[in-house]
Image (tube, rainbow, N blue to C red):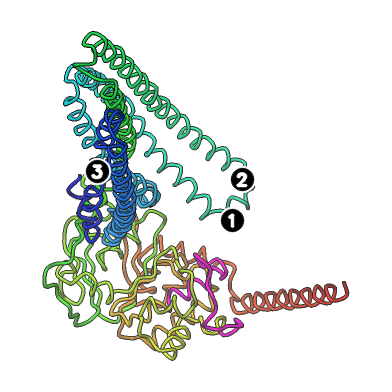
Amino acid sequence: MVKTLVKSVREYKKYAFLTPVCMVIEVVCECLIPLIMAKMIKSGEETIGHIVAYGSILILLAALSLFGGGMAGKFAASASCGFAKNLRQDLFYAVQHFSFKDVDKFSSSSLVTRLTTDVTNVQNAFQMCIRIAVRVPLMFIFSFIMGFNINARLALIYLCILPVLLVFMIIIVAVVMPFFRKIFRKYDAMNNSVQENVSGIRVVKSFVREDYEKEKFSKVSQSVKQDFTKAEKIMALMSPVMMFCMYLAALLVSYFGAEIIINSGASAMEVADLSAMITYGVQILSSLMMLAMVFAMITMSLESAHRITEVLEQKSDLVSPENGITEMKDGSVRFDHVSFKYSAKAEKYALADIDLDIKSGETVGILGGTGASKTTLVQLIPRLYDVTEGTVYVGGVDVRKYDLDFLRKEVAMVLQKNVLFSGSIKENLRWGNPDASDEELVRVCKLAQADEFISAFPDGYDTHIEQGGTNVSGGQKQRLCIARALLRKPKVLILDDSTSAVDTKTDALIRKAFAEEIPDTTKFIIAQRVASVESADKILMMEGGRIVAAGTHEELMKNSEVYREIYESQTKGKEEPEAVEEAGEAAAEALRNAEVAAAGETESEGGEN
């Protein structure tokens, strides 16, 4: 674990090395000060020159100690902050290479916690390790050596107390560690609750479930607080125990030191030596108190370090082959006895014995109920998951032989959940092709039937999209995502229920544009409406992870009872679809006119007011 984390120090190794060097300067000076002070006290009976000389040395030592401590603090801050920056980058880069399976394993909320709270904990522990954890043993060793030189028997008092403190700290760590493990798991649950609430805030408000969400969050938060309180209470015992040991040691040293001075007539030990001995004792026990602080921080960060290491050491089973193929002759797709399950431990296959042969340029429609594994089927084409059995071929080549980045550029996919990022429409579209010209943006938007509504915006293609695309409708978001995928100029285009939020007329126009403008691109269209796939070259009916029927619309109407029932249920009562659509458009136009009129009245009222 330490070996994995240390790799993230990289360019900040210099600062991590200079910090303990400066700490050595500080500790040596602090340990010499009591010795020089004792000598100065002893020289009080001599000339004033001796006092000035010793005083000058004390000032110099104090200045050096201040310099060492200040520089150590500066270097430690640079090293720890740089380490945290690199660690976050390494975690983020690792997540970028995760397969869907890896993301499912950790969960998005847990990954966020590891990138934030856990990294902060490890950062604080790292700073303490290179600064305080170096200072503590140095201070203890140097102070003990100095004290031993003054009086060996008195120095043994401090040595006897050390095992007691160490045993106590080990017990505390053993008791507290399980609490921190529970706490971080609950942190994940709390972050998951927040993430769900924020992303689904519209649903929460629509169903008036604010109180329910507050109560749910309060329970998780209260549980975290209770475990943290228990852990902190146990950790808090360190301070009073340390103080008790410090004062007990000081009392014993004072008592036995005074006895030695009186019994020997100050020949075996002088008052100045006793004063220095007490000072060294305070330094020894203070260093142990710092050790307790380090123990507390490291204890808290150990679980965080373990969680971070889990992510960094996760090896994705979806890797790009060495010298992977970077040429694709066409968009043909073939499934050769393909079976798939999401986990090796899973008893049931999500897909079972899929045999499918699609020629380049064909349009394939996929219909099926919820849980039929329609999405799972198409996710195997760009290797978002790898097959469990069988082989998927694209352009006549096993997808596992392609360079992974190249394959995913040639197989564009518009997922069920349409995601837009904060930025302009142009910036979002250029996710498909960073080098696309403005003319290309307009062309693909016309294909996706998005140009009309974009042009209606005051800023056109420079219109700012809020995070998650909250300032555009579901249908507009879908069309922008389709346009973004088209910019790839892919050999294979997959639309995973990506026109569900657009009206039937727009859906038809999109399909018509695809047929006319990208005839050589193989198109997979997952849909709920038969009308969306009716004109496809091949329609697949899926159920329970299997293809139960396949053929053209006419063939399925003759041979598939399920398909026929779906078609009839969706077209029943729609003998005059054009009239219905015209009525719908008229109603929409009337609604828009009413909104414009209402807005005008509001403005005039505002002006009068």
**Residue extending furthest toward the left:** 323
What residue is pinned by disc 1? 202
> Reading the chain from its start, which is encountered first: label 2 or label 3?
2
Compared across the picture, whether 128 is left or right of 189 comes to: left
Amino acid identity at mark 1: Arg
Comparing 29 with 207, the one in front is: 29
Name the disc covering residue 347, or none. Answer: 3
Q: Nearer the viewer, mark 2 or mark 3?
A: 2
Amino acid identity at mark 2: Glu
Q: Answer yes or no: is residue 341 visible.
A: no
Q: What stretch is highlighted in magenta?
A: 455-483
**Residue extending furthest toward the front:** 47
Quadrant in the picture for the N terminus: top left
Q: Quadrant of residue 401?
A: bottom left
Compared across the picture, whether 58 is left or right of 326 comes to: right
Q: Answer yes or no: is residue 7 visible.
A: yes
